[in-house]
Amino acid sequence: MMKRLGLFLLLSASGSMTPAFGADWTQWRGSNRDLIVKEQGLLASWPEGGPQQLWQVKLPGAGYSEPVIVKGVMYITGNEGQKGDLTGYLYALDLKTGATLWKQPYGAEWDKSFESARTSPTVVGDKLYLVSGLGVVVCFDITLKKQVWSVDTFKEYGGRNITWGIAENPLVYEGKVICQPGGPDASIVALDAKTGKLVWKSTGLSERSAYCSPALLTIDGKRQVVTMLENNVVGVCAEKGTPLWKVGHRNQHAVHPNTPILVGPNKIFVSSGYKYGSEMIEIKGSDATIVWKDKSSDNHFQGTAIYDGRIFSSGGGRLSCFDPKDGKELCSVGEARKVTFCITPAGLIAYDENSGKVMLISIKSCPCKVISSFSIKYGEKQHWSSPVVADGVLYLRRGTGVAAFDIRAK
């Protein structure tokens, strides 16, 4: 039963997201926006000291965003300048060497607390989209290496910034770029991917953004954009932006930087930190109800995923594995205290926020256990960027530091 549920979810997710380009990683959380790496032939364990490092570079600007991998090029963002006068840059790096191929500015960036660049780009075809910490949505042509358009969503739609700056990663589908300015009758907005002009806005929703990156999900037979705003988890029509349902969800800081994940045909899993906890929500038409809650695992902003019919979430000082039916914790990994992660056929790759420890964790059955580990010594500040795997290579970013590790089985 659990395996059939997992297969259903993987097929549902891959059918509703931006298509993958082979082994590329085209957006935040991977090409299917689910943290799942499907490629085979990866190391079942790592040598002492970690996998072979292929290269390591220092970027001109620091950032928290993860790299995006498309056709032999890495795209990543960073801030240059001094605090109080920061400019955001898009960098294009050669995958074989890490050398910078080109860079382009995209405008002023967030310059207050935790000032490093936030957004991970989303690439569709020859276009790349990103959102600045000041609510500006930008489109680049990566073939021509130049900016195509930009829209200040605060100015255009009455958007308002939040405590630590806008930190969403753009969702793109069917010629629409989804962003969350949090303006009056414009909590969520869809822009034309070619021009940046308005396609729809979520009239009736006026809550501010809450760091959450939206998901495109088919729930109860209806395709919708699902996200967490400052006070509610909401779903809006994917074609028109019409609000469909909402359910109360707010922690003490209105910080919800975790994308909702689909669990079966009409349920979603969400989690928020600051002791709020995790919830399973059932949606039937315009009605949304909480099926179960678990306060012991409160995922701050490290991401959640469903794999092989189980939910994986980092919170409460551990990596937890849940049964989606009742929220029962099946097992946990205490060594993975507060991690970002992605899931591969060889195991879950976790990257610890505080220590910089990188772990390969067996999750084939419970109890889950650490198989191998090593630590990141380069870079500066917090280890907040998620691990990325593309074509047998693991990419890890910390501040201005980026490195590539070979995890292919020999």
Image: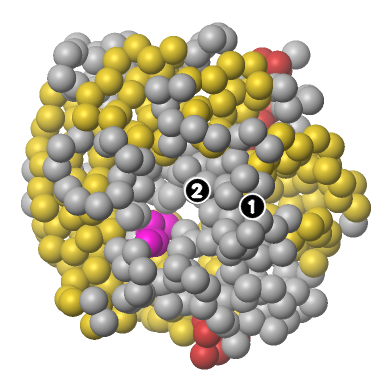
Magenta-colored stretch includes residue 119: yes
Q: Residue at x 59, y 55 (%)?
A: 256
Looking at the picture, which amino acid does disc 1 mark?
A: Leu
Q: Secondary structure at mark 1?
A: strand
Horizontal and vertical percent position of residue 168: 49, 62
Horizontal and vertical percent position of residue 295: 68, 37
Looking at the picture, which amino acid does disc 2 mark?
A: Phe
CA distance separating discs 1 and 2: 19 Å
Q: What residue would you read off at disc 1?
A: 216
Q: Quadrant of residue 186?
A: bottom right
Horizontal and vertical percent position of residue 391: 29, 31
- 237, 112: nearer the viewer: 112
Q: Residue at x 44, y 12 (%)?
A: 369
Q: Nearer the viewer, mark 1 or mark 2?
A: 2
Q: Quadrant of residue 291?
A: top right
Q: What residue would you read off at disc 2?
A: 301
User: Earlier along the polypeptide chain: callout 1 or callout 2?
Assistant: 1
Q: What are the residue bounds of the magenta stretch?
A: 117-122
The answer to whether 91 is drawn above or below residue 389 in the figure is: below
Horizontal and vertical percent position of residue 393: 25, 31
Give the residue furthest to the bottom: 155
Q: Residue at x 59, y 23 (%)?
A: 321
- 178, 319: nearer the viewer: 319
**Considering the image in quadrants, where does the C terminus appear?**
top left
